[in-house]
Image (spheres, rainbow, N blue to C red):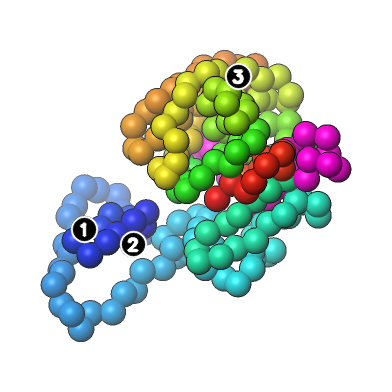
Amino acid sequence: LWPDYDSSSARFCVRLEGADAAGEVMVWYGSAAATTTSDGNQTYSFFDQFDDPSLDTDMWDIDPYANVYTSNGRLYVKGNFARYKGEFAGVQAKSRFDTATHILEMEMIYEGGAYGHFGWADGNLLSYNRMVFRKAAPTGNRQVQPMKASTYVLIDQNWAVPPNTYSIRRSGNTAYFYVGGTLVKSHSSSTQVPTIELGPHFANNGGTDHMI
């Protein structure tokens, strides 16, 4: 079951191996004796709902000076403002994916009170290629940012604040940004939208508190 469910409704994703034609997915419900077979790791190319006592370092690289921990199925990320002088730091997935064939979906609870971003990237402290949602400052604009080989653009978008679900995908030289399943911004550029493989990334500058 992902991305969410409660006592009266649920959303879920199904992985259909080898499906080559349209068909039907049958769902039975209402049995109090039923047990879940939900398995995000078998359904998605990359999945982490942060329910381990600590962040899985087989899946993630953690900046050594960032303050990172998990609690109650949530990931808390805070950079180190004193050491990095405002540069972003946090966590970067070890795996890389083709962003034209993979959609990154993130459920954010709180974007943090300082500069920060979350989305696709190719590095932890210094990422030179990325497609991210970006919070410019505690009182500044919310933006989206494509960056290719350090050439980037900051686009004011003022996306809806968390809690919400945020998704990013790419087609050719166009990056697409979604909030709550709705497209909020697209940007096309052969010099600003990266086409190399990227991984999930969460970071902020550590000026105030954690992003969650």
Quadrant housing residue 71: bottom right
Of labels 1 and 3, earlier in sequence is 1
* Amino acid type, mark 2: Leu
Please give left or right for residue 64 compared with residue 120 in the image: right
In this picture, which residue range is highlighted in magenta?
A: 80-101
Q: Secondary structure at mark 3?
A: loop
Q: Disc 3 marks which residue?
A: 154
Does the segment drawn in magenta span residue 210?
Answer: no
> What residue do we see at 66% from left, 20% from top?
152
Tag nearer the camera, 2 or 1: 1
Label 2 CA crowd tier, 10 Å (few <14, some 14–19, many 20+) = some
**Image spot of residue 102 (x, y percent):** 48, 43
Q: Secondary structure at mark 2?
A: loop
Q: Disc 1 marks which residue?
A: 9
* Amino acid type, mark 3: Leu
- Labels 1 & 3 near each other (Cβ < 8 A): no
> What residue do we see at 47% from left, 48% from top?
109
Q: Disc 2 marks which residue?
A: 1
Residue 35 or residue 75, whichever sits in front:
75
* Amino acid type, mark 1: Ser
Mark seen at residue 202: none
Of labels 2 and 1, earlier in sequence is 2
Please identify the residue farthest to the right as the structure is shown: 83
Task: Reply above or below: 104 against 193.
Answer: below
Does the segment drawn in magenta span residue 92?
Answer: yes
